[in-house]
Image (tube, coloured by chain):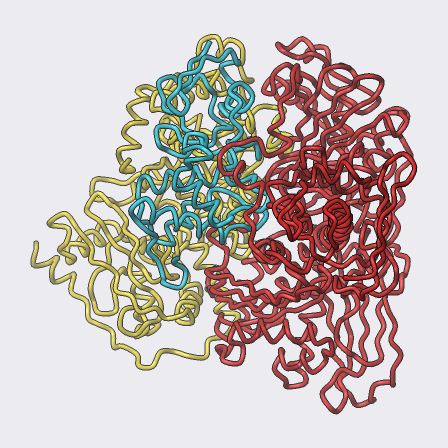
Chain colours: A cyan, B red, C yellow
Amino acid sequence: MISLTVNGTTHQTEADPDTPLLYVLRNDLGLNGAKFGCGLGQCGACTVLIDDKPVFSCLLPIAALSGRKIRTIEGLGTGDKPGPLPAAFEAEQAAQCGYCIAGMIMRAQALLERNNRPTETELRAHMATNLCRCGTHMRILRAVRRAAIVMGGGVRGDPQSAL
Amino acid sequence: MSGLSRRQLIGSGVLVVAFSLSRATKGQELDKKPVLAGSLEKSPRLESWIRIDAEGRISVFTGKAELGQGIKTALIQIAADELAVPPARIELITADTRRTPDEGVTAGSRSLSDGGSAILNAAANVRMLLTETAAWRLLTDADKIELRDGAAYAPNGESLGYGELAAMLSLRVEARPDVPRRDKGTRLIGTDLPRVDIPAKVSGGAAYLQDMRLPAMLHARVVRGPSDGTRLKAADVDAVAKMPGIVQVVRDGGFTAVLADQEWRAIKGLRRLQAAGWTRPGVLLPVEDMAEAIRHLPAQDVPIFETPGAPPPPDGKTVKARYARPCLMHGSIGPSCAIALWENGGVTVWTHSQGVYPLRKALAELLRLPADKVRCIHVEGSGCYGHNGADDVAADAALAARAVAGRPVRLQWMREQEHGWEPLGSAMVVELQATLGSDGRIAQWRHDVWSATHSTRPVSAGGLLAGREVEPPFPAQIPRPIPMPEGGGHRNGKPIYVVGNAKGVYHFVEPSPVRVSALRSLGAHMNVFAIESFMDELAKAAGTDPVAFRLAHTVDPRARDVVQAAADRFGWSRRMKGGDGRGCGFGFARYKNLAAYCAVAVEIAIDRDSGEARIPRVVAAVDSGEAVSPDGIRNQIEGAIVQSLSWTLHEAVPFDTTRRTSFDWSGYPILRFDGVPDRLEVHIIDRPRQPFLGTGEAGQGPAAAALANAVADALGTRMRDMPLSPEKLRTVVRKA
Amino acid sequence: MVAAVVALSWRPAIEPIANGVRGFDPSLVAQGESLAFIGNCGGCHTADGGRAFAGGRALPTPFGIVVSTNITPDAETGIGQWSLDAFRRAMRDGIARDGRHLYPAFPYDHFAKASAADIDALYAFFMTRAPVQADAPANWMTPPFGFRPLIAGWNLLFLDQGPVADDPARPADWNRGRALVEGLAHCGACHTPRNALGAEQRDNAYDGAWTEGWYAPPLNAKSPAVQPWTAEALFAYLRTGVSKSHAAAAGPMARVTRALAQAREDEVRAIAVYVASLMADAPAARGAPPSATKDNAVDAAHPEAAVLFAGACAGCHEPGAPMMLAGGPPLVWGTPLQEDTPHNAIQIVLYGLLPPAGRAGPTMPGYGESLSDRQIADITAYLRARYTDKPPWPSVEQAVARIRKEKGE
């Protein structure tokens, strides 16, 4: 029996200890946000926050997580009261198929919590870990810039590409 | 409105309303033939499309599927608009063989033109019926009835809700063509209605097939060799069957799947089975250059077009060029997935296939069931750009689930299985030759395109991977060229330009050495890349500005408008002089020569030392006819442009003689955030009341060509072989 | 003595050339470009995210921080005013155009062995690059090493002049390989240990050494590689960044292989031939077979690490994983686990491997953000036990903590 603290709530799971967190989040805890994209740590669709750092949940066995703080997109507010990033993504309609979006939001959340005034270059370099195949990049960047302002900062960069 | 007859009760009390259409239609400017719009032709009964229950809840049925292109929202907009209800009142049911019309495949950017216009006209018919019925019951004229918020109002304020009205009429009637569209009240069409699917996607709600959890569900993995053409060696199945949580290892001939109570255990079982190794039993692959191989394989000649004209002047300037592209992947972020459940002698399959009806047919044959015992329900998967692994995984799930009847089985492909087995976009070669007259205009034009097929969509069991693995295997499907005007490898093989004496031939290569099928825009990406690059080469030979050269050869006024709009918004006439790694390029096409018009202008800056391309600016203009959701159009075109930039700059499926050698993103890199343009704008030319024009694939060709033309402008050298990779750019820079 | 050194150290300035130089033969420029990749000039002279060859990369040394200079042909801030003589003198003697001594962080002790033809080709290449106006930040040397004339004394002790003569008993590619390796490729600058004055220990050539926190393993009979480094295997490694019988290049070596991927193929082959010959007497080459993995016993002895490995690593590294089906090298053949120090293995686990944007190449995610020091140490120790016959590394967890600290985490 392994204990996991997800979005502030502690859960017990009987999944095998080597099970990557992604499958436990989805199948045991019913949390849909983190997605299976590759299982190889290359696409970021599974991105969650562990102790405020963005990680690939597809490569993190639950046995390694005792005492760590796990946060998923479900912890960033609810449908009625979304956090700044989910709200910004909705406002910018920043999705086509949307499969990569939960991972994008968590990746961006880690950046803006650490530094809500990144440069445009820093923003793009940080987000480059996550893949989008539909080509929604421009909207994703607009959404993150929008959220940065709501979080008390803003993305610094050439004026042409800022909000 | 006048001349409408009074109603009579008939027979059992069911009201049949007959109405005449004495006025000329003010609706869609469709051709005047009395043909039903879009998919209505095949499914003319109104109740196939729209039902209203006693409480006034409206269900709209579509055979089209949400692929991430926003079609659900657009169809809801259309229906809600026509029925004068808030969008939240509409429940949209998509592609389900038990419940929705058969609209074939959601592909070819036909969702709005076929599906949207069907719903528009069906809803217009239903609106007429509701109006008529209300007028009769409320003792007034139909043209005095106002529809608002799900009820019909008479001038005296009396009203009847749609639920009450629906109980009085039957929708089991055929749609009438040319029913006018609603001409008063607020409009939803043309507004940016927020997408109905996005809220769940930004909050962890259940939004995808991959999120479905059914009671007693098992997890499965299919076991194959690493790539199309390979086969797994015999594995120690007994040892795997004994692993914890493994419920069963299903085998049928060469088809193998492992079922487990937990997903991770299924994966571990899969890995254990795959450790046995693999072989390639068949013919080896041509490795060096797949496009060059395609150029020389046996092909059947299919005419694309022939326009007679005067022979070109003998002293005219002749330009020849050869363009090529490698095999490309769909590369959807979420590998394909399906859930299957056998019960009551039949099977239900939840699938993200683009075509639930053709899939059902193929599955019925594979599983040896009558079609009515197979139900395929579309549930959204990750981004779908054509014929990917969705159909195959549906068959895999159905076979795996057959062994555990009564329990749903969720079978998920692994990333390496999607990389190794999804059908690819064929490698292609285009050879163009044209002659300029003394007036600097094109007097003669010849287009030859070589490609393997752009559709192996399963219509029979042999079109599914599992269909070829089971014992006995089903016969393989034989691909045939997709007929024009849509076309496959020859899609957009005919230029939109007036080019004098012209001919185009499609050299259809069959059999293909590798597994190929439909990838977004089919042959248009290559043909438009070639034609638009060639137009620049001709413009240069003629000493004319590339945009002016195109306009000089374009008569379609909407095409001219789009070209002009993109050029103006980009500032084409004021653009920088190209050279020293910086330049601008333009690309334009009308998708399929009958769908949306799209023009793209690109500015590029190439680092001389690394060959890395930075894209400071992209400006696009698009005409999709009547814009149902302008933001939806912008989203699709932005996405098409970024995806096409990725294809054209970076992508090529690598092979060795035995297999595809890329099994994950490390071997098939795509554009990431550090490579997308600095700025990307899309400008829409709205054409109210014009037919909806398919938009989802309209950007692929123009963006690719604009990029190639920008590179030529920047480096002074024409590059004709995709991808225009950093390595190639660097080589060109060095030679300069 | 100091006066003698100071006297020795004085070098005249060489006249600047006006208006740059033109008219280089394109094939000479192309040859120079290949040699610039072999010498990996950009590895030091291009800063991260900086313009090519414009300098500004800080190189920590035991004597202070040396910042690479701008070697683009910019007249004011680069070498635009340098004649061929000035360039040659810098490459061979470590003297700048204005007569100042250059720090041997710039490995002119190796470049001194390059042929005149190679140096001329490099000159043609550099003088045809895009000029960039950029002043590199000043060095920050620990006193007294900021006093450049001291370098004259160092040169006196340690600088050998001139190319090495060909060995007529050896084939042409071996000789060319040696000329490049000892010269422009300066492999010994990382792979040979240095003395207290920072000079390579000639008697311990290629015995292995530390650079930028990574251990560059021995390239001689002491090579700990499990499989022999044949010329073929080395060529594949140098050219693609991975050898299917060894492992992927990591750390500074990854950057070297990316440069060598762009050099002339025959020159890289020559390097491989020569370096393979240096390792002809290594244990792997003498036919000692690699050990089998000892899964079950090791798993029982390291139960927590075995679980971590199964969840975090097996997806790429176990026999049925796609990377292995594609012919990726198994961990049992990897040199990092065989080395006497766990530093390389730890850093690979912490930071992973990433090709440059948009390129294909060996890829591995880093685990530094998701695993603790203890977990990283456990896995590393487990890998050592499972895939080698060597004794366990001491103090692995402390090493992990130290590495993180040095990286400023």
Q: Nearer the viewer, residue C67 or B692?
A: B692
Task: Kindly indicate the quadrant of the structure image that contains residue B377.
Answer: top right
Q: Is residue B637 above or below residue C174?
A: below
Q: Residue at x 57, y 34 (%)?
A: A38
Location of residue B34 by image quarter: bottom right
Could you tell whether C361 is left or right of C143 in the image? right
Answer with left or right where residue B372 lies relative to residue C62: right
**Image label count:** 0
Quarter of the image with the N terminus of chain C in it: bottom left
Name the residue: 52% across, 36% down.
A45
Task: Judge whether residue B13 can be spotted in this image.
Answer: yes
Name the image quarter holding the C terminus of chain C. Answer: top left
Residue B723 or C90: which is nearer the viewer?
B723
Q: Position of residue C324 (x, y in %)?
A: 61, 30
Task: Give percent across and percent down for residue C52.
Answer: 39, 61
Q: Is any atom of residue B658 visible in this view?
A: no
Nearer to us in this view, C227 or B665: B665
Q: Nearer the viewer, residue C126 or C191?
A: C126
Percent x, y of residue A37 = 57, 35
On screen, C167 above or below C193?
A: below
Which percent across, then down, holds residue B731? 56, 64
